Image (cartoon, rainbow, N blue to C red):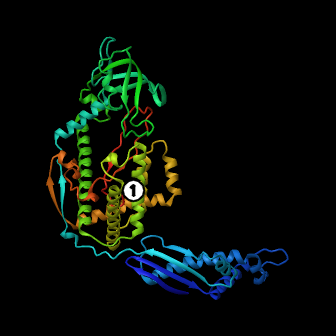
Amino acid sequence: MEVSENLNEGLKRELTITFSANELEDKLVSRLSELKSQARINGFRPGKVPVSHLRKVYGRSVMAEVVQETVTDSTQKILDERSERPAYQPEVALTEDQEEMEGVMAGTGDLAYTLKFEVIPQIEAQDFSTVKLERLVAEVNDGHVDESIAEMSKQQRDFKARDAKSKAKDGDRVTIDFLGKINDEPFDGGSAEGAPLELGSNSFIPGFEEQLVGTKAGDSLNVEVSFPDDYQVAELAGQPAVFEVTVNEVAEPVETEVNEEFATRMGFESLEKLREAIKEQVEREFGMVASAQLKRQLLDKLDDHYSFELPERLVDQEFDQIWQQISNELEQAGKTFEDEDTSEEAARGEYRTIAERRVRLGLLLGEVGEKNDVSVSDEEVNQAMMERLRQFPGQERQVYEFYQNNPQALLELRGPIFEQKVVDYITGEADVTDRTVSKEELYRDPDEDGDDDKPAKKKAAAKKPAAKKKAPAKKKAAAKKKDDTAEG
């Protein structure tokens, strides 16, 4: 085997590996000899088939196996000898010359292939004890508990039908039949019967609920609205529509009294036990938010501190993933970059910076984790998978089988766990000062006070998928996902 280096520039490497025809011949004969004891060919006793005959029958297919095995084994051996860590699976390219390849398969020509890859850069991790972080701490008080219980009681409240002459008010629940039309033509998903709608809940598109205020049971009316420009169904986005609505019932809310009976109905022994459980729940929520804020702060500091060459292909792959998502969202909303007060060129630059940030932090956290023996156990992956199963009630078996049959999907569960464990390790080493804040400050988006000159710290415009709704008259519920992870 001969190895020649064609390119060694920055992180990029290109090698040419050559195996002589004699080396391949030795491998071929060895494989055919192994096959001799297994082959069953008419006219020959078991184990007595001449290698020369096996070569005539199986030579080409066995040579193909020899070539594949030679390329695979030699690639790993060369990387080990060079002590280089590829940033991704190296690109292997055999000759495209048909005549040369025929010679290889016939056993008369040398095998030559190229190996292209980029290496993981050398990263010198800093002394993390010099990293100063501020952890936000919000104490849970009775007011927070009261607020959560009030929200719980609101969700559990009943409604009582008003008399036939009573007009609907904000906060009332109306039960309606509706048929939506665009240009006098009904559209898919634009109708329902007996649909409950709480006025003021903003669960339908803007302008719809307001026009039902003042109606009473038995009323029929046309509700004229326009779908939002960013509506999730592109065909309806921005379209004016008329809904033929019949009000079947108007019901007023019956306030739920928070007492011992309510606590029992919620499954608790007493109101005191309910308050204790709610307090623990709020404490967990505050803790999760504080942890996320601390992680975001740490990643921003690491991003500011570290600057090293990045594998171009990793950045390209990350950018392509982000860009595809952004393009799909704009297309679905029927918008252009100009509608978002930017240009495609400017947007590409911004999202390229975000892609670079993600790759940089991913490589850094990977290096820190490896050097400090951070690992993810199978039990932790299984726990993450169980959490995913709970998100799909009724489909647990299908989701479980999906993960069992897709190793890559399991790997995607392992990645965030590893990342969080590395973040926990670094914050454990860092100089962390606690600062007591209000709930409002704890939940405040850091980007609200952010620096627009640092687009990598801005929100990534990667939206969580909006839940499908039975009637597209309901408005889009899409929350933007913050770029607070290294992997994105």
Task: Check disc 1: other Cα within 10 Å, few if <14, some if 14-19, many if 20+.
Answer: many
Badge 1 element: helix
| Rendered position, 269 above or below 103 | above
Give the farthest residue toward the right: 43
Residue 9 in the image, given as x and y percentages of width and height: 39, 79
User: In screen coordinates, is 401 left or right of 299?
Assistant: right
Q: Quadrant of residue 56?
A: bottom right
39 left or right of 382 in image: right
Please state if 470 lies on the left or on the right of 268 as rendered. Answer: right
Which corner quadrant of the image does residue 353 belong to? bottom left
Count of number-bearing discs: 1
Q: Nearer the viewer, residue 302 or 399?
A: 302
Q: Is residue 188 above or below residue 408?
A: above
Q: Position of residue 68 (x, y in %)?
A: 60, 75
Image coordinates of residue 477 in percent, x first then y, are: 36, 40
From where the camera sits, is residue 270 visible? no
Residue furthest toward the top?
165
- Identify the residue at image location x=36%, y=54%: 344
Q: Quadrant of the C terminus?
A: bottom left
- Where residue 337 appears, x then y in whole percent? 35, 49
In depth, the one of 21 and 207 nearer the eye is: 207
Q: Which residue is tagged 1?
A: 322
Along the line of sight, which residue is nearer the eye, 458 or 100?
100
Which one is nearer the viewer's eye here, 327 or 425?
327
Q: Quadrant of the N terminus?
A: bottom right
Going by the numbered disc 1, the residue's amino acid type is: Ile
Q: Residue at x 75, y 83 (%)?
A: 51
Residue 311 seen in this snapshot: yes
Q: Quadrant of residue 356?
A: bottom left
Residue at (43, 39) in percent of width and height: 233
Q: Is residue 47 left or right of residue 111?
A: right
Q: 454 above or below 179?
A: below
